[in-house]
Image (cartoon, rainbow, N blue to C red):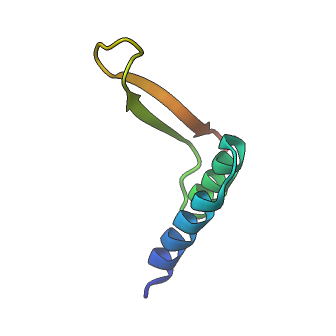
Amino acid sequence: MSQELQRAYDYIDAVSAAQTLDAFGAVTTCTFENFGIPNYTLAAMLPQVGGGPRQFTPLTRGVTDA
């Protein structure tokens, strides 16, 4: 198995174990930086309460000074 693929599997295991959104963000930031991604936003298209079109909802983001 390639090193990059193993790191991706490790990320999946780590975020699956995250108990809070802050923990999820910390694991994601660390992992993405290791892949050379200094800035990111993870979002979901969530349904609105009461119906209507799905709405872009940021879940976590990371921005570094790099």
Which residue occupies the extreme left position in the image? 53
Q: How many marks?
A: 0
Where's residue 10, x and y in %? 57, 72
Q: Is residue 19 above or below residue 54?
A: below
Which residue occupies the extreme bottom position in the image? 1
Which residue occupies the extreme front position in the image? 50
In the rendered structure, the answer to whether residue 11 lies left or right of residue 45 reads right
Quarter of the view holding residue 11: bottom right
The residue under the point 44% across, 84% down is 2
The residue under the point 54% across, 35% down is 59
Where's residue 31, x and y in %? 60, 60
In the rendered structure, the answer to whether residue 5 lies left or right of residue 22 reads left
The residue under the point 32% across, 14% down is 51
The residue under the point 43% across, 88% down is 1
Q: Is residue 6 above or below residue 54?
A: below
Where's residue 41, x and y in %? 51, 38
Camera-side residue: 11 or 49?
Answer: 49
Q: Is residue 59 above or below residue 66?
A: above
Where's residue 54, x and y in %? 32, 22
Q: Is residue 59 above or below residue 57?
A: below
Quarter of the view holding residue 63: top right
